[in-house]
């Protein structure tokens, strides 16, 4: 049970987008060597936690996509909590509520962002005071995208996801963004397996124009083979007024569009809604 005077602490698990994702090589360990510019939305899942004194970690899940998620021991949030307990020798527990606003297995890092947010949250709740770099190291054991999700700021990510370099791309901060998911969950492992093993070259990012003109998502083709509807989403977005860039995020199927003007973003969101389809959309901006 929560302690009587328990404070509730909260964290946002910010949605991740890969503004560009270059796959360079399949490594001997089965992972792929990446070069990716990660950015984060101002919105995402929500985590709340209360302190308990019995050492147990209890997770409850609600929100629009909560029903699709298992709240058991293999949930990444529970795993993150256990990992932090082991690492610090923490003997108290927590009741954690995850409000799942982001679609599952959708390329915007929902699970990874949740795990990272859980590490940040419990680091505070248990007063462990681990520095961010240590949380990033811990997070890698939970998933390749977890380290980058600890800071959730724009950064170049290399290796399998553990080499992080923050990037101050000022033009990006506050940039209106639309996320669109056609409702087909994709397995990251499967999409990586379908990569054609063609190294199309490095990612060199100085500014936003480099992301737009020199950036790619090398997993688009493989993801489209599994879910051809992604081509439809991208085709639609690329045709819309005011879209600076439309691209798939991660291993899909969520695609994002960047705009200079929030009015254009809302017009595209409205057009999608008025079509009455069941695509999930989120109007947000880069944090
Ligand atoms: O690390 P994570 O569990 O998120 O990765 C899920 C799967 O995605 C891995 O098992 C692997 O097949 C694939 N992957 C990869 N290269 C990466 C990251 C993930 O091949 N850099």
Image (cartoon, rainbow, N blue to C red):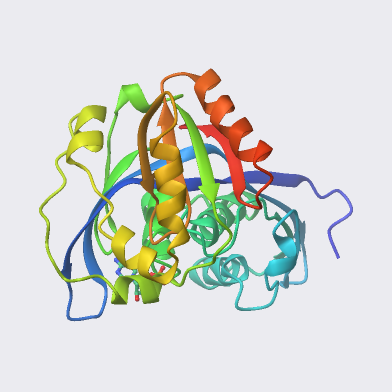
Query: Which residue corresponds to the image point at 51% horizontal and 36% vertical from the top-left?
Result: 178
Residue 59 shown left or right of residue 171 in the figure: right
Ligand 1 position by quadrant: bottom left
Residue 59: give x, y in percent of width and height: 73, 66
Name which quarter of the figure residue 167 lies in.
Answer: top left
Residue 251: give x, y in percent of width and height: 39, 62
Residue 5: give x, y in percent of width and height: 86, 48
Query: Which residue corresponds to the image point at 60% horizontal and 65% vertical from the top-left?
Result: 77
Query: Which residue corresponds to the image point at 10% horizontal and 53% vertical from the top-left?
Result: 201
Query: Which residue corresponds to the image point at 42% horizontal and 63% vertical from the top-left?
Result: 228
Q: Quadrant of the N terminus?
A: bottom right
Name which quarter of the figure residue 76 lies in.
Answer: bottom right
Q: Nearer the viewer, residue 203 or 287?
A: 203
Residue 101 shown left or right of residue 163 in the figure: right
Name which quarter of the figure residue 62 lies in.
Answer: bottom right
Residue 268 shown left or right of residue 174 in the figure: right
Residue 250: give x, y in percent of width and height: 38, 56
């Amino acid at each position: 049970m929560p302690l009587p005077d328990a404070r509730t602490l909260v964290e946002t698990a910010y949605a991740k987008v890969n503004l560009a994702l270059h796959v360079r090589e399949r490594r001997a360990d089965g992972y792929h060597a990446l070069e990716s510019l990660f950015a984060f939305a101002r919105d995402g899942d929500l985590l709340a936690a209360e302190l308990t004194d019995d050492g147990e970690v209890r997770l409850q899940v609600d929100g629009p996509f909560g029903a699709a998620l298992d709240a058991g021991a293999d949930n990444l949030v529970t795993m993150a909590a256990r990992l932090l307990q082991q690492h610090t020798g923490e003997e108290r527990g927590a009741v954690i509520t995850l409000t799942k606003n982001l679609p599952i297995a959708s390329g915007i890092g929902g699970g990874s962002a949740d795990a990272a947010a859980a590490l940040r949250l419990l680091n505070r709740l248990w007063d462990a005071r681990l520095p961010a770099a240590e949380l990033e190291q811990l997070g890698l054991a939970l998933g390749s995208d977890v380290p980058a999700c600890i800071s959730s700021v724009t950064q170049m990510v290399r290796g399998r996801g553990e080499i992080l370099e923050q990037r101050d791309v000022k033009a990006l901060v506050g940039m209106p963004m639309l996320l669109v998911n056609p409702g087909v969950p994709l397995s990251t492992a499967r999409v990586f397996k379908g990569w054609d093993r063609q190294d199309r070259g490095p990612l060199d990012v100085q500014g936003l124009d480099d992301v737009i003109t020199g950036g790619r998502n090398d997993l688009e083709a493989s993801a489209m083979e599994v879910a051809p509807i992604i081509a439809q989403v991208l085709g639609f977005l690329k045709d819309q007024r005011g879209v600076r860039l439309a691209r798939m995020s991660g291993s899909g199927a969520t695609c994002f569009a960047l705009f200079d003007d929030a009015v254009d973003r809302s017009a595209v969101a409205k057009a999608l809604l008025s079509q009455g389809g069941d695509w999930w959309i989120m109007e947000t901006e880069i944090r």
